[in-house]
Amino acid sequence: MKFYRIFFLFSLEVFIKQTLNQWIYWAKRLIDHPDGMDMDAATRDLSRWIGYFQHERMAYLIVTALFAVLTMMGLILLVITPSWATMALVALIVILLVFHIHRYYLLENKTQELYGLLDQMIDIQREKKKLQQGHTQTRDKGIQNDPIP
């Protein structure tokens, strides 16, 4: 594997982590200050990005499961034919497995945090709609009962 490929994979991981953190920051800020924002568009955008993160999470899950299977196969091979080469191979696979578990853990937790923030945004959106409907209904009733033409 060439160096630029390793750099690309690392930069992709950094990009995903930065993007997740930016969306979490943006959603928290929007929840704290919901006035002046189109909450419908914000929830649609966040839902779309959560779909992207779900895809990444699924890919990391598949790769992590593959490394777990490779680790088990390597351990079985190490028991059957113990050698330094087999031990080095198993050690390398275990190290990669630990890194993949860590990445998947971060991605899973951040995506779950986005789910919670999305739920809060939807609740704020519903409250705004209820307030607007209630205000419109009372305003309409007041106009109908107004004695001055």
Image (cartoon, rainbow, N blue to C red):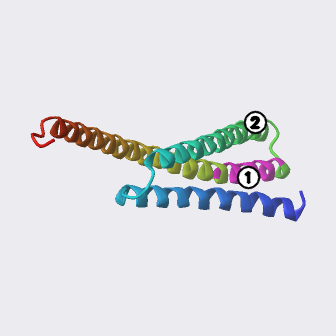
Residue pictured at 86% horizontal, 64% vertical: 4
Graded by Cα atoms within 10 Å as few (under 14), some (14 to 19) or many (20 or more), the crowding at tag 2 reads few
Query: 90 or 120: nearer the eye?
Result: 120
Instruction: State the image coordinates of residue 80 (x, y, percent, origin top left).
Output: 79, 35
Secondary element at tag 1: helix
Read off the residue under disc 2: 73
Query: 37 or 145: nearer the eye?
Result: 145
Q: Please give the range of residues in magenta.
A: 86-98
Disc 1 to disc 2, C-alpha distance: 12 Å
Query: 54 or 105: nearer the eye?
Result: 54
Residue pictured at 80% horizontal, 49% vertical: 89
Q: Quadrant of the N terminus?
A: bottom right
Query: 68 or 118: nearer the eye?
Result: 118
Disc number placed over residue 91 in the picture, else none:
1
Secondary element at tag 2: helix
Q: Amino acid at mark 1?
A: Ala
Q: Amino acid at mark 2?
A: Met
Instruction: State the image coordinates of residue 22 (x, y, percent, origin top left).
Output: 54, 61
* In the image, residue 78 lies in the stretch drawn in magenta: no
Q: Quadrant of the C terminus?
A: top left
Q: Is residue 51 left or right of residue 73?
A: left
SS assignment for the magenta stretch, majority: helix
Disc number placed over residue 36 in the picture, else none:
none
Residue pictured at 82% horizontal, 52% vertical: 84
Of the two numbered discs 1 and 2 on the same chain, state the one appearing first in sequence: 2
Q: Is residue 54 left or right of residue 29?
A: right
Which of the 4 image quarters holds residue 122? top left
